[in-house]
Image (cartoon, rainbow, N blue to C red):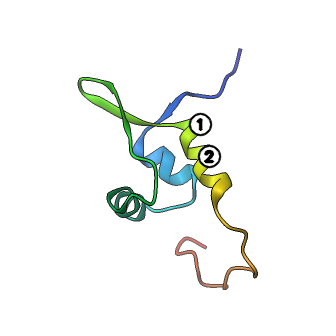
Amino acid sequence: MRFKPAFLDKPTVAEYVSLSVGTLERMVQKGAFPGPRKISDQRVGWLVSEVDDWAASRPRSSGLPVANCARNQ
């Protein structure tokens, strides 16, 4: 059985929402993105349902992205 994970690690959550790790960290510090939750004494992760809620709350764009907005393209 394949199922959706409950938590994502930092690199995976950044990729999941199309942000760099640095941008993700800055947004968490500013309170503009959900913070990680403690999974165990040595591990934290982002609750997928909170990340999904954040993503769904983003406003719709009025235009298409500019051609050079992504570094890896």
Taking the spot 49% from the left edge, 45% from the top edge, the residue there is 12
Above/below status of 36 relative to 16: above
Residue 72 location, x and y as percent?
55, 70
Q: Amino acid at mark 1?
A: Ser
Q: Quadrant of the N terminus?
A: top right
Above/below status of 38 relative to 24: above
Q: In the figure, residue 46 lies in which quadrant?
A: top left
Q: In the figure, residue 36 lies in which quadrant?
A: top left
Above/below status of 22 relative to 9: below
* Number of the label disc, if any, that sits on residue 49: 1
Residue 68 location, x and y as percent?
60, 84
Q: CA distance from mark 2 to mark 1?
A: 6 Å
Q: Which residue is mark 2?
A: 53
Q: Amino acid at mark 2?
A: Asp
Instruction: Please name whichever residue, 42 or 55, is drawn nearer the observer in this view of the structure.
Output: 55
Q: How many marks?
A: 2
Taking the spot 34% from the left edge, 34% from the top edge, the residue there is 44
Taking the spot 64% from the left edge, 62% from the top edge, the residue there is 58
- Label 2's element? helix
- Binning the other alpha carbons within 10 Å of mark 2 as few (below 14), some (14 to 19) or many (20 upward) gives few
Left-right relation of 43 to 60? left
Q: Quadrant of the C terminus?
A: bottom right
Instruction: Please name whichever residue, 73 or 64, is drawn nearer the observer in this view of the structure.
Output: 64
Dot 2 and dot 1 residues touching (CB under 8 Å): yes
